[in-house]
Image (spheres, rainbow, N blue to C red):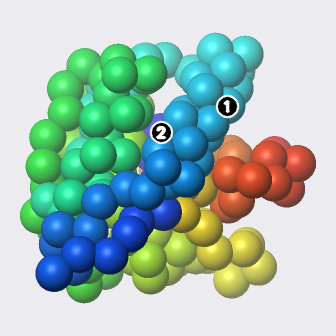
Amino acid sequence: MLLTLWRHGEAGSAATDELRALTPRGHEQVVAMAQHYAAWAGESGLGPVSLLLHSPYQRTVETAALLGELLRPGSQKVDPSLAPGAYPEAFSENDYPGHEHIIMVSHQPFVSQAIAVWVDTVALAPLAPGGYSTLEVTCLARGGATLLRHCPDPWDLASKVKI
């Protein structure tokens, strides 16, 4: 299974954390990275995205909507387990039967912690707003995934790591 962990784009302020929306810069970050991801996925022969999951917070809803427009996943839905406070040990590959290519849009610190745990390394840069990392997953346990691509910063696409 392919799994891409995507951090929402830059968000502004609001009365509550749940209502923080993307800024114009956040919108640009997501669109730039989605275009970059689509080009890489096409060149690499990755199959289509079968499932796009996102937290219920406004900034991830908006990020997922932009990704949905550009990447056209088979299905898209809210996953409350991706809200702030998520932790890698709560996820299992068995939760996604029939899905070969999944994108999860969530928050820090979860996205970077999950990458570190599942790939079993702390050497990668944390995801900045709009950044993503794609893993080939055998199981969602420590060391159960292989890093395919790490693009932590939308404004520094040259920093991507290809393994």
Q: Residue, x 44% and y 77% (percent of image)?
A: 108
The earlier-in-sequence mark between 1 and 2 is 2
Q: Residue, x 56% and y 42% (percent of image)?
A: 28
- Could you say whether the residue bearing mark 2 is in a helix, strand or loop? strand
**Which residue lies most toward the right here?**
158
Which three-letter amino acid code belongs to the residue tagged 1? Answer: His
- Could you say whether the residue bearing mark 1 is in a helix, strand or loop? helix
Q: Is residue 7 left or right of residue 39?
A: left
Q: Which label number is shown at residue 2?
A: 2
Q: Are the residues at dot 1 and dot 2 in contact (C-beta closer than 8 Å)?
A: no
| Residue 37 appears in view | no
> Where 150 falls versus 38 (above or below)?
below
| Residue 96 appears in view | yes
Residue 100 % position (x, y): 37, 30
Looking at this view, is 97 or 160 the one in front?
Answer: 160
Which three-letter amino acid code belongs to the residue tagged 2? Answer: Leu
Q: Nearer the viewer, mark 1 or mark 2?
A: 1
Residue 125 % position (x, y): 72, 74
Q: Which label number is shown at residue 36?
A: 1
